[in-house]
Amino acid sequence: MRDVVSFYAALSDKTRLRLLSLMVRGEVCVCHLQGSLQTNQPKISRHLACLRKAGLVEARRDGRWTHYRLKKLEGDFGKILLQTLNHLRLEPQIKRDFQRLKRVAC
C-alpha cells in the first residue's frame, strides 16, 4: 500500500510532473531542469528527492553535475506513468518547458 501512496503523491504536484515530462526523452542535468522550469536549485532538488524516494527517477553523478532520468517501471505503475506523461506533452506549459530546455546551458 505504501508504494501506491508514494507513487500517486509524487504525481500529485505540478512541478514534479513538469520535471518528469522533461526526462521523457532521456537524461537531464539538474542545471538544465532548473533553467527549463525557471526556478531555484533548492526547489528542484527537493522535488527530485521526492521523485527518487517514490522510485520514479534515478540519478547519475558526473563530477559536480547530477543527471536524472526516468526509472524503468514495471507493470501498472509503468503504464500509468507513461500514459500520464504522454497526456502532459500536449499541455502548453510542458511545451514551453521543452523549448527552454533546448536553450539552457550550464
Image: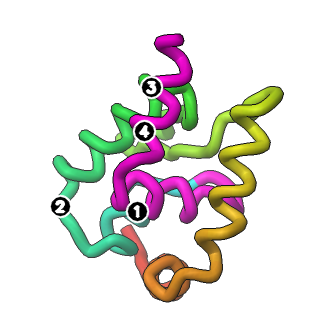
Task: Using the image, tell me which numbered label, if any, was put on residue 6.
Answer: 3
Q: Which mark is residue 40?
A: 2
2 and 3 marks in contact (CB < 8 Å): no
Could you tell me the amino acid type at mark 1? Leu
Reading the image, the residue beneath label 4 is: 10
Mark 2 vs mark 3, foreground winner is 3
Residue 15, quarter of the rendered image: bottom left
Q: Quadrant of the C terminus?
A: bottom left
Mark 1 or mark 2: name the one nearer the start of the chain.
Answer: 1
Other-residue count near label 3 (Cα within 10 Å), few / some / many at <14 / 14–19 / ≥20: some
Name the secondary structure under disc 2: loop
Question: Which amino acid lies under the numbered mark 2 shown in the image of this protein?
Answer: Asn
**Could you tell me how far apart the alpha carbons at marks 1 and 3 are, in whole angstroms?**
22 Å
Residue 8: % across, % down = 48, 36
Q: Which residue is nearer to you in this view: 88 or 1?
A: 1
Q: Residue at x 53, y 17 (%)?
A: 3
Residue pointed to by mark 1: 33
Q: How far, Cα to Cα, is label 4 from label 2? A: 19 Å
Q: Residue at x 26, y 74 (%)?
A: 38
Q: Give the number of the mark in front: 4 or 1.
A: 4
Q: CA distance from mark 4 to mark 1?
A: 17 Å
Residue 76 in picture, x, y percent from top left: 77, 32
Q: Are marks 4 and 2 in contact (CB under 8 Å)?
A: no
Labels 1 & 3 near each other (Cβ < 8 A): no
